[in-house]
Amino acid sequence: MPPSNPAPEPDRATPSDELPGPLETLRVLEIGDRGEVAGKLLADAGADVIRIEPPGGGRSRHVGPFVNDDPGQPSLLHATRNTSKRAVTLDVTQPAGLELWQRLIGRVDVVIDATPPTFLDGLGGGWQWAAAQPDLHACVWCSITPFGRSGPRRDWAANDLVQLALGGPMMSNGYDDHHLPPIRPDGEHSIAISNEYAVAGLLAALWMRNAGHRGQLVDVSIHEAVSATTEGAFPNWEYLGRLVQRQTGRHASPDPSAPWQYLAADDQYICLISGGLPRGAPAWSGLLDWMDEHDAAGDLHDPQWQELLHRDPRAHPEARLHVAETIGAFAQRLPADEVYRRSQSLHFAWGIVRRPEENLDDPHWADRGFFWEGECPGVDHPVRYPGAPYRFTRSPIRLRRRPPLLGEHNHEVYVGELGLSSAELRAHLETGVV
Amino acid sequence: MPPDPPDPPLPLDGIRVCDFSWIVAGPQATRILADLGADVVKVENESYLDSMRLGLQQDMDQPSLNRSGFHSNFSRNKRSITANLHHPKGREAVERLLAVSDVVIENYSAGAFARMGFPWERLQEINPSLIYVSVSGFGHVGRDASYGTWGPSAQAISGATAMSGLPDQPPAGWGFSYLDHTAGYYAAIAVLMALHHRARTGEAQHVDMSQIESGMVVGAVPMLDYQINGRTYERIGNRSRHPATAPHNTYPCAGDDRWIAIAVDDDTQWAALCDVLGLDALRAAPRFADMAARKAHEDALDQAIAAVTRERDPFDLMLQLQERGVPAGVCQRNDDKQERDPQLADRGFYPTAPHAELGEHRFEGIPMQFSHARWRMDRGAPLLGEHNHAVLTELLGYDEDELATMLAELAI
């Protein structure tokens, strides 16, 4: 088994934490329960993001898991989605709350509005109100809703499961056995996907505004974001009139393909992408040498296999299946990590199926500074948050603040920045406006 | 008749992207930028072709680099030039393009673009304000940077595969390259953030993206749960662990492999569900009386519901449940989405556009609408080298004679 790769030389391009993020100077308000990831992406990039929550806290504070599994303790869902933000409480359904909300909008570049489609407009503090205020001409208003702000199903009820069903990904995910249901991957991906699109959209609108145009509404539909995230299912129907069929642990396809996910000798799954089939002579010889070490090459030394697969892979499904099964049977005899690292050293892009937390111990991610060590409310030791998937060399994305407590920045924002007196803030706290 | 009002502007009009991306992850990023109005110029050659041109052919018996519907959907609104990097004049044309671009993006294996002659230092010499975004499996920095991924292996390593599937079955994973999509989404975000940074400071930079990291971010909660509560991740199928609600699952319906997702969030929705399904007995049963009780008897609950949904048309049932405010959705196939989804149709999510060889087809739109701007769906993917003439003469300053020489010498 090849040893793990050595640690690299210190990277001379490692960005200093002292540098500002790419969105330093951007000011953002975030309200509602479906836009927290968008707010986080902006906040980690240096924007000043203030999350507005009702006095009882937004949804994520009430969803587990909780610190020490105690529902009275902070939520880990909230922690992961609210790094680097500030947080204030506000009941916008009360007139005094609405007025504070309107005053806050005057101080920002962007509003992320993830409340239901007509909620804020119904109160007189939504996009329609903002668009009519001359002094809010530059405001970019990014709305994130389950189905968009128009259309016959605008007000339909949906959660993550329903969105991933309607948008199509589920019909591609599952098992060869279709008595088993289509599968919704865990992790609220419909929020992630739509929020990624929302950030792209609002940054594009901001780009326009900075070029001299007015601010505007960006109306993001979660249903459409999910619908755009199914890869081959769309062109198969559009160009060939074919529907893809789900298969265990591999790409859905109109035609069945050879398996590529196996249980290795140490009970961990491995992913032999595209059946593990070698492409080209060097790949074949490297693989056969490795199989020979375990006396497991079977009849694969017979040059006919290489020829059949090389000539026209589509024309010989039975040859592909035979080679894939022989390779799969070999790989199952080895521990998963050995399959992963040896195959990668031979330039096969095979994978190991890790649980998410197993990546915490892989030093490659530490080399990249991917995990951000910091404080988590309610926890008496530092934790490592997964960072950002992009590594900016001149304007680092990083953990700027730990996730905020409920209403933690009420005084700072309402008194320090909006100019309320301490007595006014106290009165608002007593009446539940804040 | 009054003249048509002028089209609203495209948000990224005036931004130019030199696009060395291929397959899905990179093209997904530049597709967003092109739809939003950037001038995206794909640079290819036989030795570094976007091999997705060979994927999903309209006519399997007559494969063509210009007739892949898959490629057309991912590279619509872009332009294409061919340039031979082994010929000095071909290389010079690419360098001229880099000199007039705001962004260069590639998703080769780590190090490949430098070996093609474009390390970051060289890019800075050619154009000091050029933003460079690289997308690779493990990123360009780190001890395993030489390792490679495709979508499924990246999903496996990241934890995304393990988080998908039934508890008593192997991982179901994702039936497509999900992380090719999201790596592309994050790369588009990275381009826009880097543009904002450059506009404010004048500073360009290299952004090093890792496809696996774009999957790890979605495993954030299990990572904290492990560090704080010592819990290792276990699959939950289509149920909901947090919040602990039930029923929350997929249920079989009438028809071949038809399923409906139902997610009840409170007792009012539970009562409505029982009404619509005609399950008065279920509603009256003490073991299903409240959320905690339903959660405690979830297997029996799901069996009882499935026994009646089996007889129901999935779309009728969805409409009836939605009318009562119960979150419910059919597990839609692409024919459902493209031919029968009134919401997607009403919002114009599948606009049509022409393609030089594939004809008129629908494309997946961008999932947003702007009040004072538009996104575009002007045309399908460019034919290989379709814009050699336009780009080299109008943009890069070559005259007709120079162009003819370059063609004759196979420099382009």
Image (spheres, coloured by chain):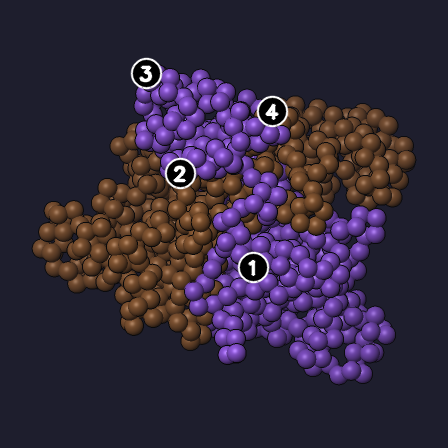
Chain colours: A brown, B purple
Q: Nearer the viewer, residue B142 or A260?
A: A260
Query: Disc 1 marks which residue?
Result: B32
> Where does the image place residue B294, in percent across and percent down from the top left?
37, 22
Determine the CA span between mark 4 and mark 2: 29 Å
Query: Disc 2 marks which residue?
Result: B323
Query: Disc 4 marks which residue?
Result: A179
- Same chain shared by disc 1 and disc 3: yes
Determine the CA span between mark 1 and mark 4: 37 Å
In the rendered structure, the answer to whether residue A256 lies left or right of residue B278 reads right
Q: Are discs 1 and 4 less than 8 Å apart at CB?
A: no
Q: Amino acid at mark 3?
A: Pro
Determine the CA span between mark 2 and mark 1: 35 Å
**Disc on the earlier residue, 1 or 3:** 1
Q: Nearer the viewer, mark 2 or mark 1?
A: 2
> Where does the image place residue A238, in percent across and percent down from the top left?
67, 49
In the rendered structure, the answer to whether residue A150 lies left or right of residue B103 reads left
- Secondary structure found at label 2: helix
Q: Nearer the viewer, mark 2 or mark 3?
A: 2
Specify the quadrant of the image occupied by residue B382: bottom right
- Same chain shared by disc 4 and disc 2: no
Q: Residues within 10 Å of mark 3 (few under 14, many from 20)?
A: few
Q: Nearer the viewer, residue A386 or A217?
A: A217
Q: Amino acid at mark 4?
A: His
Residue ID at (64%, 26%): A177
Q: Amino acid at mark 1?
A: Ile
Specify the quadrant of the image occupied by residue B154: top right
Query: Disc 3 marks which residue?
Result: B286
